[in-house]
Image (cartoon, coloured by chain):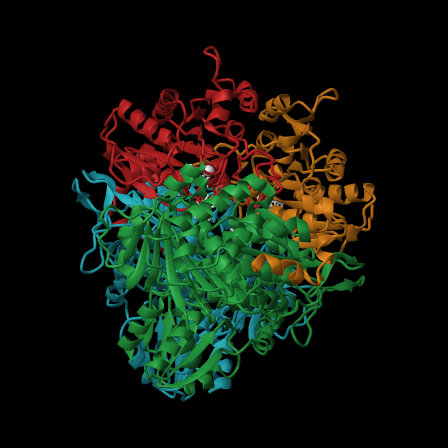
Chain colours: A orange, B red, C green, D cyan
Amino acid sequence: MSSPFDNRLEIAWCPGCGNFGILNALKRSLVSLGLEPKQVVMVSGIGQAAKLPHYLQAHVFNGLHGRSIPVAFAIKTVNPNLTVIAESGDGCMYGEGGNHLLHTIRRNPNITVIVHDNQVYGLTKGQASPTSDFGFRSKIQPWGNLSLPFQPLSVAIAQGASWVARAFSGDLEGLSKIMQEAIAWEGFSLVDVLQPCVSFNRVNTYQWYQERVYYLEEDYDPTDRVSAFSRSLEWGDRIPLGIFYKEEKPTYQEKNPVFTQKKDLIYREIEKKDIWEEEKSHFI
Amino acid sequence: MSSPFDNRLEIAWCPGCGNFGILNALKRSLVSLGLEPKQVVMVSGIGQAAKLPHYLQAHVFNGLHGRSIPVAFAIKTVNPNLTVIAESGDGCMYGEGGNHLLHTIRRNPNITVIVHDNQVYGLTKGQASPTSDFGFRSKIQPWGNLSLPFQPLSVAIAQGASWVARAFSGDLEGLSKIMQEAIAWEGFSLVDVLQPCVSFNRVNTYQWYQERVYYLEEDYDPTDRVSAFSRSLEWGDRIPLGIFYKEEKPTYQEKNPVFTQKKDLIYREIEKKDIWEEEKSHFI
Amino acid sequence: MVDFTLKIGGAAGQGVQTVAEMLSRVILRAGWYVFSIEDYQSRVRGGHTFTQIRFSDVPIFAAHKKIDLLVALNPETYELHRGEVVPEGIIIGMIPSGGDSASQEVAIDFEGIAEEIGNRVFANVVAVGSILAVLGFDFQLAEKYLETVFGRKGPEIVAKNQQALKRGKEEITGRLQPPFSFENLSSQFSSRYLMSGNEGLGLGALLAGCRFYSAYPMTPSTGIMNFLSSRAERYGIVVEQAEDEVAAINMAVGASFAGARAMTGTSGGGFCLMTEGLGLAAMTETPIVIVDAQRPGPSTGLPTRTSQGDLEFVLHASHEEFPRVVFAPSDAQDAVNKVIKAFNLSEKYQVPVIILSDQYLADSRFSYPDFKIREAPLAPQYLTTEKDYQRYLITENGISPRGIPGEGEGLVIADSDEHDEAGHLTEDLTIRVKMHQKRMNKLAAIRQEVGLPLQLSGKDLTLIGWGSTLGVLLEVREVLHQEGVEAGVLHFTELYPLPPRVGEILDRSPQPVVVEANFSGQFARFLEGEYRIPLKRRINKYDGRPFLVENLLEQIKGVI
Amino acid sequence: MVDFTLKIGGAAGQGVQTVAEMLSRVILRAGWYVFSIEDYQSRVRGGHTFTQIRFSDVPIFAAHKKIDLLVALNPETYELHRGEVVPEGIIIGMIPSGGDSASQEVAIDFEGIAEEIGNRVFANVVAVGSILAVLGFDFQLAEKYLETVFGRKGPEIVAKNQQALKRGKEEITGRLQPPFSFENLSSQFSSRYLMSGNEGLGLGALLAGCRFYSAYPMTPSTGIMNFLSSRAERYGIVVEQAEDEVAAINMAVGASFAGARAMTGTSGGGFCLMTEGLGLAAMTETPIVIVDAQRPGPSTGLPTRTSQGDLEFVLHASHEEFPRVVFAPSDAQDAVNKVIKAFNLSEKYQVPVIILSDQYLADSRFSYPDFKIREAPLAPQYLTTEKDYQRYLITENGISPRGIPGEGEGLVIADSDEHDEAGHLTEDLTIRVKMHQKRMNKLAAIRQEVGLPLQLSGKDLTLIGWGSTLGVLLEVREVLHQEGVEAGVLHFTELYPLPPRVGEILDRSPQPVVVEANFSGQFARFLEGEYRIPLKRRINKYDGRPFLVENLLEQIKGVI
Ligand SMILES: Cc1ncc(C[n+]2csc(CCOP(=O)(O)OP(=O)(O)O)c2C)c(N)n1
Ligand SMILES: Cc1ncc(C[n+]2csc(CCOP(=O)(O)OP(=O)(O)O)c2C)c(N)n1
Ligand code: SF4
Ligand code: SF4
Ligand SMILES: [Mg+2]
Ligand SMILES: [Mg+2]
């Protein structure tokens, strides 16, 4: 299935990596949403996941490890006409960038954050990531990871994120649907995507996930914060997928008086003649 | 009431500040726990709250804004005999230092984190802090704070913190009790202390808090994570105080094989003669 | 020439700055030139703080050590500063019983009087009344001032304030042989301008077309954010308080990538956290302006004091190499112009520009007979992209035409990794070499746009300085002149890259003495490295206080 | 003298490094000297990666451009590198049908053969078999190696591997007129040592008594953490993966405050995030060692390549001024010694020490006839405190006796603000001045402990370099000598503060040429600034690849 979002850059991921599923689902959802490449800005950090923006047609800001979210927030703020998606790995988003996730949720900008959650640091060759299971072994944790896993969904729900979901890169259909809804959502949306890393994560494999994942029930109510929290804790033999929580709240753009007063894109209004004339009196 | 923790440094807080209550309660709990100054290390960041360690007798590491928790973690790890308390303001702990809070919870070191939560940046003169109410006005937010407040308790519970409480600096008795239990707890404990700032927070005053705070019911069960989460969301007309959540888990020290193998304090074992003799064969 | 210095001291929270603000404004409107400095501690209430206001009938840009009038809002001020008062000087305010100063003293309980009027808040206006009376100023301007400031609070408040003013005046009448009677220099409101360094930096951004300011509060840079916030709604600027400095600079880079002129501001510790983002701006060739408002360190140091200690750090901050521009404005007016020029160079060359401020510049207030805005903001330099747009096209002058997402048909691809012309990450080492050259070569062109240092000749010695020390150097030069010493001044505000010909200028500068507010003479070392000439005579100050005219004079005499 | 270079290339994930590891070890154990470099991309599978192994009967510390034997694990390797093979060279492995190289070629499908044996994993051992056969090495050592490495996996696995080795050998037998027959230089296992730069840095920490290593993974520094983790349980070292670099350095500072020798490691981008913590260590006078493993930037740049581009940054990193030490080891053995010395100076003077590594040093493997550990770890310098202990006591030499919490009766009070002798924050400007002087004055004493650069004379020119370039400079000097040019070498590994007398040494160095792996000659500029002598002849490389002997020779001829 070819799409206007296809491009021809050589993909540097390992054959069989779960990232391919994420790339395909993303392209699919962008097409479904009727978007054109020039309307979409992909912002990423550094890591295997963070290479994704280069593998589709879109504007790209491939910035620093851990720092995609503040960049995405600012781009969306400056040009609300653009569809802005921040995506990167679990190390990038939850480790180095954890603080930005926490605080950007509070602003509720209309951006989507997609996390390739392979529970490992891929690009740096296999260290435990924030979401690695307790006991996960690596070269620098030969005794096994001593930390309990970061809880992306629970934390996002706790912080009052307006839209929170988990998906699985092995289910193209389900993943595309969730992504599509996330991108369409007016406000901050987080999609944590379970993504097998065939090179470094020998624990959380395709099979491991496949044996455990299931979708939240049809009648699950994603507007109840407490039950969303409760379900977000479920992890182990059964791992729920789907939209855990949503709550409509004013977006950053809607809250900021600058945008209610200025109608054009803010960056276009550079030439303010006579600001000095207006300002003078304050300094006399 | 004089105590071995009293010292004579001039206190640079504003008269009437809620910080005094926190200082008094802390000294009281340290005495109640039978601790001596030389057993206690106070670690802080930068801010009004962060000056506290200078106002009592203890070891002090008054480090960088936002960075008290990693320092405290390391001190405790190197010398488990010490009682290590990280304390600082809401801006310090939840703003600049948010990421350290998130990840230190995962390690579960046996330290206590006390946050002077005055819902404002005191030392820098009144900007909104992460916990400021939506709409809070300041010189740099004349239009009112656009972000929803950070949820310290909910986030800590979501991350699986082993002990989480909220207290009020206006209730010396209650605060001391909570602090005492927090410090005695084996594992990571977080105390968010509601603290009026008489100079910059005209919203969340003593009276404002006093009208709203109440203690969790006697029969409240702090071992149920979901109900702890649910209660942690309560904020507005009624604000619960007390121990929201506790769960015993192995501490960092208990998990790290270095400590199960080495019995003395690790820093004391500097002189390893013949390491090179042991190592040589690996390089031949 | 009239040259008068008054110092108002008190505890933090007592209103020293309110008194100073009102007084400066009134004196200014009476046609005088005003220069003031702020000294405060890292606390909110208590302790000790003061403002020192100097006024004159000629322009002045430096502070003196000697005080003509000391206004003590609390007794501690008297204890701490009476030694600085000249013999013919006056002290008023909270004088401990039986003050023993050699000066004329008038004990006044400003707060007591204010309470009599009905509220302690009037104490500041009482003090202003007394001060104006001591100085012999006409009260009309002060009354007018109260009307404009308190007008919207209703006539009653205005009346109370005017009463306070009068009561303050009455405390002086008869109790002091008023040695002063400064008149209004012009009969109507003059058009003198009064501006702090932080206001200048903010105003510069405003005039340059800044549309996005993200920062984390940090003294002494916070005033810039205060200023821009106060103008944000009016002019359509997004001012966002970030969760930390890392976010602040990444937001600014993102905003600029999207097309908005963006700035951030901080102090040294925050700048540390921004260094990675600085490199990001450089690698992605995204324009950005960063203010580093210096204070003494290392680390937290003295958070409310002044320093010129970050020079070498900002010259080399962030790993590896890239072109950058570093400016250090000398005063408020220069700050306005330097920030506009910073935005212009940043936009034109797609490089980060760093503005070095310091607490002395940030908080001091400078007055001007006329305010000269010499720099004009550059029109936006981004183009409307075509389909095959390449963000990092290799061009002859090293500048790749910049597109922004959404303006045109092209895709804008930026990458912090080494990249090809399209912007995609590459490991091709030939492309790497070309891209690195392309970036680095911009420096040569920028060098041509940098202004020369201010040069004033003097055969006996040359005072070399940079940034906020201009005013004191100029005044010291004049004093030396009166004493028969011909001192030249060579003062830099555009520090990096240095413009061509500076070497020659240095070569013909007699007896250079480098004056700077840091321990080891960073600027001297920088010049030594660039031009391989020894600059062994140095005056360094690192106690966190600004250079005062008398002290600097003494130090100069010590090295020549 | 034997001097042989072989290059093994393939896609990431194919096992290039496994082949290289085994081969190096076997050649080493046969009594030869080995030097190898690694070249890899920022990806996990695919793309292209190679290891280049050079061996000789005399010590060698640099890489050549010319290849004697090319081992192609995939066809791309052949395409990319056959041009580098000398005419009398050999190419084996995946040669595209009808290879057209002038060299002798033997097409071998290592993976195909491995599959015949039962599993593709044996392909690497097959390759080793073929290579050893080409070189004419005795197979005993290789068989022994397989036994030790695979022994614990059972005899069957050992047998399979030995079969693979043999099959590899058989592929050569008869198909190539073996031009080589390198013999074992000693009949039994030799005591040659083989060590990578990262292992050297880790081992140095181990020997220095490092008890706490906190870091965030970042190429090319991660190998240090891998090494220390592998030793952590055995020797009782806490190795903690931090959530970010800010946490990493703050943890290290905290650990050191509590009494443990602490280190952290990162690369440029992570070092940026550590700069604030660096200042914290300096202000609190907490010993700490930081490794910055350089790679090309700015920003993310080329994450797996080499550079010497961070020098000026680390010299000035963090705002304001404080004493620091900067070392840049030349090779693995030097790394061990430099890290020990770093810990010692850090502990003695209570200052941060920065070790500049780079990808070339980190990943290269160096061999030694004997391993010299010259530095001995200093005994712990903290004292048992008394009741009235003052952490920042002002002493004559600037060093305040250090206490740690829990050892003694005293309280240890450390502060990032300016502080008094007790450690409490102060705004007293007189104390500030004293404390700043106390800190800065330590630099003079440290300077006396810094080693002189390595000096080798040569009347025609002087090659000046620092850090990881020592090996190539030494070899180039020898080649020049053979060509009748007398080149001196002046090589620095202890960069800051520079020891006394360097100026004189420079003055008498004929025709200096500064060689470094960055764009603008940072070390040259540093020396120019310190000694005000012009160093205009510079050789700079910034394509991310290490200096190779032949290229550097050519470049030198270009500038002299
Ligand atoms: C400041 C900084 N620290 C560290 C790195 C090194 N680094 C690059 S990618 C990465 C981790 C990648 O893990 P993750 O984000 O989970 O992405 P994945 O490769 O697993 O997709 C790290 C630590 C960096 N580039 N920048
Ligand atoms: C890296 C850095 N950024 C900013 C600052 C400036 N700063 C000092 S205290 C403070 C905020 C204080 O607020 P909070 O932590 O809530 O403490 P409070 O004063 O309210 O007790 C800030 C922003 C700093 N010291 N370091
Ligand atoms: S290392 Fe893991 S995450 Fe990265 S591309 Fe390979 S399989 Fe995917
Ligand atoms: S500013 Fe607020 S928090 Fe700080 S000391 Fe004063 S009242 Fe307390
Ligand atoms: Mg990952
Ligand atoms: Mg606060």
Q: Position of residue C179 (x, y in %)?
A: 35, 63
D220 lies left or right of C517:
right
Asked where in the image residue C551 lies, by quadrant, the reply is bottom left
D341 lies left or right of D218:
left
Residue depicted at x 33% and y 64%: C65
Q: Most extreme residue toward the top, as rendered?
A: B219
Q: Is residue D111 above or below residue D36?
A: above
Asked where in the image residue D221 lies, by quadrant, the reply is bottom left
Q: Quadrant of the N terminus of chain A?
A: top right
Q: Position of residue A165 (x, y in %)?
A: 67, 32
Asked where in the image residue D198 lies, by quadrant, the reply is bottom left
A60 lies left or right of B236:
right
Q: Position of residue B191 (x, y in %)?
A: 43, 28
Q: Quadrant of the C terminus of chain A?
A: bottom right
**Count of numbered circles in the view:** 0
Q: Position of residue C20 (x, y in %)?
A: 44, 54
Q: Identify which residue, C420 or D460, lies in the foreground.
A: C420
Q: Is residue A146 above or below residue D328?
A: above
Whether residue D366 appears in this view of the structure is yes
Whether residue A94 appears in this view of the structure is no
Q: Identify which residue, C471 or A51, lies in the foreground.
A: C471
Q: Quadrant of ligand 4?
A: top left
Q: Identify which residue, D117 or A182, lies in the foreground.
A: A182
Q: Identify which residue, D237 or D483, lies in the foreground.
A: D237
